[in-house]
Image (cartoon, grey):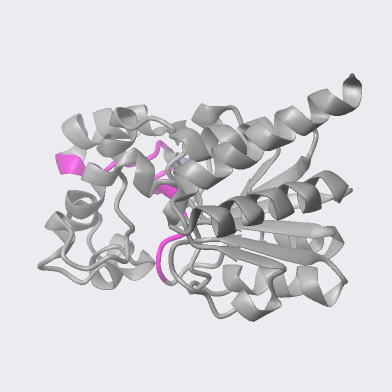
Amino acid sequence: MDKNNHFNKIQKITEIIRNSKNMIVLTGAGVSTGSGIPDFRTPGKGLWEKVNPYEVTSIDAFYANPKRFYHFYRPRIEKLNEVASNPSHNAIAKLEEKGYMKWLITQNIDNLHRKAGSKKMIKIHGTLDEAICSKCHSIIPSSELLKMLDSVCGGIPYCECGGIYKPNVTLFGEMLTNLDEAITISSKADLMLIVGSSLQVSPANLLPQYCVKNGGKLIIANQMPTHLDNFAEINIRDDVCVVLPEIVKLIDRLDECEVV
Ligand code: ZN
């Protein structure tokens, strides 16, 4: 890391955030790797090594064989209870608390933003801490789902209505939830801070383009290059668990100076 260059970028990002009126934050898997949650798409990760996640955890796989689906999916739900938010989640919650961030749009289903204290949030891929009935759409917490997997009907979590509970997340082959709302919010933002997303997953990767098209700025904090780097005011490639707290710390200092 070139320290001077790094600090210049932090300063510049801080300035842009403090001058924004309607900043939103878009997050992807990269904010949660610091909590020990591997990027779903990273090859060679234990359970997923021998299977194609697209085949075992798609919506078609769920309906074809819910028991097999949960064999692969259950560890992801259980893992959720063991993980805590990390400094990047906490910094994003702080940006909201301080009034700089108006909305958070997340691709993550791990609920860690909520654990960190974020409130105004659109979870475009849903959330893993809930399950939803495929028929009547009633929602139960995933703790209840896990109990059902252990005890009821040979591991198939039937709802009273006859439907089957599925994790309240967007499975492969399903439409995104809340996409229209995310598009509207992205279109109105004057700044989108993108954190830990390689912007490879469509249609979430289109959201920054709505922001730019309407005159908004982009800042991208991600370890890998993205296809929108050329559109960003600043790209910063360092660890988001370091970068985000640094930004918040500098904002704190500058805000205090202004009060004095
Ligand atoms: Zn039902």
Q: Nearer the viewer, residue 193 or 5?
A: 5
Magenta stretch bounds: 154-172
Q: Quadrant of the C terminus?
A: top right
Which residue is most to the front?
Answer: 4
User: Relative to residue 112, is residue 120 drawn left or right?
Assistant: right
> On the image, which quarter does residue 251 sit in?
top right
> On the image, which quarter does residue 83 sit in?
top left
Q: Residue 111, percent across and down?
A: 47, 38
Q: Residue at x 82, y 58 (%)?
A: 189
Question: Count of labels shown?
Answer: 0
User: Relative to residue 234, is residue 27 drawn left or right?
Assistant: left
Q: Residue at x 26, y 28 (%)?
A: 147
Q: Residue at x 78, y 65 (%)?
A: 217
Q: Quadrant of the N terminus?
A: bottom left
Q: Residue at x 28, y 45 (%)?
A: 76
Is there any visible trace of residue 133 in the rendered image? Answer: no
Is there any visible trace of residue 142 in the rendered image? Answer: yes
Whether residue 49 is situated above or below residue 243 in the rendered picture: below
